[in-house]
Amino acid sequence: MTRLFFSLFVVSLLCIFATGCGGGGTSVKGKVTFDDGTPLTVGTVIFETEMLEMIGMIQKDGTYRMSTDGKTPGIPKGEYKVAIVGAGESIGEYDPVTFNLIVRPLIDGKFRDSSLSGLTCKVDGATTFNITVTRPTEEFTKRGIPGLPPAPQR
């Protein structure tokens, strides 16, 4: 009898983990725009909890759709902090120190960190979460990172 209860307990736990952590889930989509209404056309939206990270690639029209694995639409229900990464454009030059392609940020740096962005989303059913971002607040430097001195001239 004890063995039966233990087996049922283990099966119950497996079902809970399988449904709570599996791919797919609740539909979450939205659009990322600047405060003037124009769409952000590049980057990745990230929904984070302490244990999970879900992604949604931003399309050319500014729309995104969240996914747990990059392919299957939908994410688990819950409270998420939100960030946007990869929102930059190449200026066609390389940094002479690191030899990395110089990328100019398109959005304010606070949006790259979910703890600084001020963006949160509660997902408890099909959700549309539109995001408004601002452009960088500091002048673009030759290195492409606000606040750093320009790269040395040759």
Image: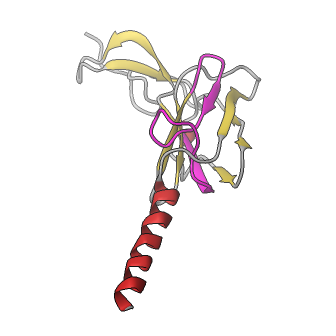
Could you say which quadrant of the image residue 36 lies in? top right
- The secondary structure making up most of the magenta span is loop
Residue at 54% of width from left, 53% of height from top?
115
Residue at 50% of width from left, 44% of height from top?
54
Segment tinted magenta in the rendering: 58-83
Q: Is residue 25 above or below residue 44?
A: below
Q: x, y (%) of residue 122?
A: 68, 54
Q: x, y (%) of residue 11?
A: 42, 71
Could you say which quadrant of the image residue 108 lies in? top right
Residue at 60% of width from left, 16% of height from top?
60
108 vs 95, left or right, is: right
Indicate whether residue 80 is drawn in magenta.
yes
Q: How is the image coloured?
A: secondary structure
Viewer-proximal residue among 19 and 127: 19
Residue at far front of view: 1
Indicate whether residue 56 is drawn in magenta.
no
